[in-house]
Image (tube, rainbow, N blue to C red):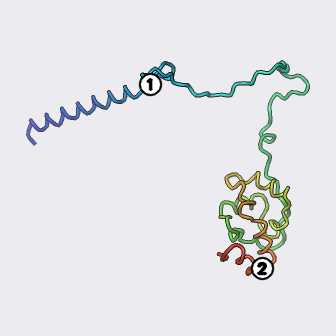
Amino acid sequence: MSASTLVIIGAALVLLVLVLVLLARTGRKSAEGPADDGIAMVKPATELSPIATDEPLPEPGAPGTTTGLATAELAPAPVPVAEAPAGPADPLTRLKGLGPKAEAALNGLGVSRYEQIATWSEGDIARVDAQMGNFKGRIVRDRWVEQARLLADGDIAGFEATFGKLG
């Protein structure tokens, strides 16, 4: 390369850097002050503010007040729904809408057999659903209890007629 080519490339790079710096500076707007168009920017709230009431706040340490909540009070530990029946665990992933991660979550709650899921009451469903994290709502939506009843009874034809081919 000749010296003139290097000078042209260097000048182009310097010009490019200057344009980028100018674009970066003009793209920033102050969160406190008004924008260029006269509209003030709203600063997002970073914490919740208490709602004003007519009742005075209780004194710290007064009877009936709590000074802090233990972690166990905020998030209860998983409660097994029922004792697992004797024998090997069933492949819960055969239920439609229940994959390996949901199966692991159920196993963590002590659920490993179709018979357990088949006997769930509405209260059991609500208690397990509250502990299912990302899978919350899947028990009812995918009809796990109905599917488990069919599989626990060995009714493969009934399962496939209602839920499709067993995988």
Q: Position of residue 108 (x, y in %)?
A: 75, 58
Q: Position of residue 26 (x, y in %)?
A: 37, 26
Q: Residue at x 49, y 22 (%)?
A: 39
Classify residue 98 by image quadrant.
Answer: bottom right
Residue 43: mark in rendering: none
Taking 156 as reference, is 19 above or below it? above
- Kind of residue indicated by mark 1: Lys
Taking 143 as reference, is 22 above or below it? above
Q: Residue at x 71, y 78 (%)?
A: 161
Q: Position of residue 24 (x, y in %)?
A: 36, 29
Mark 1 to mark 2: distance in Å? 66 Å
Helix, strand or loop for disc 2: loop
Taking 135 as reference, is 97 above or below it? below
Q: Residue at x 28, y 30 (%)?
A: 19
How would you rate the neighbour count of disc 2 (Cα within 10 Å): few for under 14, some for 14-19, many for 20 or more?
A: few
Quadrant of the image containing the C terminus: bottom right
Q: Position of residue 77 (x, y in %)?
A: 79, 49
Q: Residue at x 9, y 35 (%)?
A: 4
Q: Nearer the viewer, residue 8 or 55?
A: 55
Name the residue carrying label 1.
29
- Kind of residue indicated by mark 2: Asp
Query: Disc 1 or 2, which lies upstream in sequence?
Result: 1
How would you rate the neighbour count of disc 1 (Cα within 10 Å): few for under 14, some for 14-19, many for 20 or more?
A: few
Quadrant of the image containing the N terminus: top left
Classify residue 79 by image quadrant.
Answer: bottom right
Relative placement, left or right, of 115 versus 12 is right
Q: Nearer the viewer, residue 109 or 56?
A: 56
Helix, strand or loop for disc 1: loop
- Residue occupying the far bottom of the picture: 157
Cβ atoms at labels 1 and 2 below 8 Å apart? no
Name the residue carrying label 2.
155
Relative placement, left or right, of 121 versus 138 is right
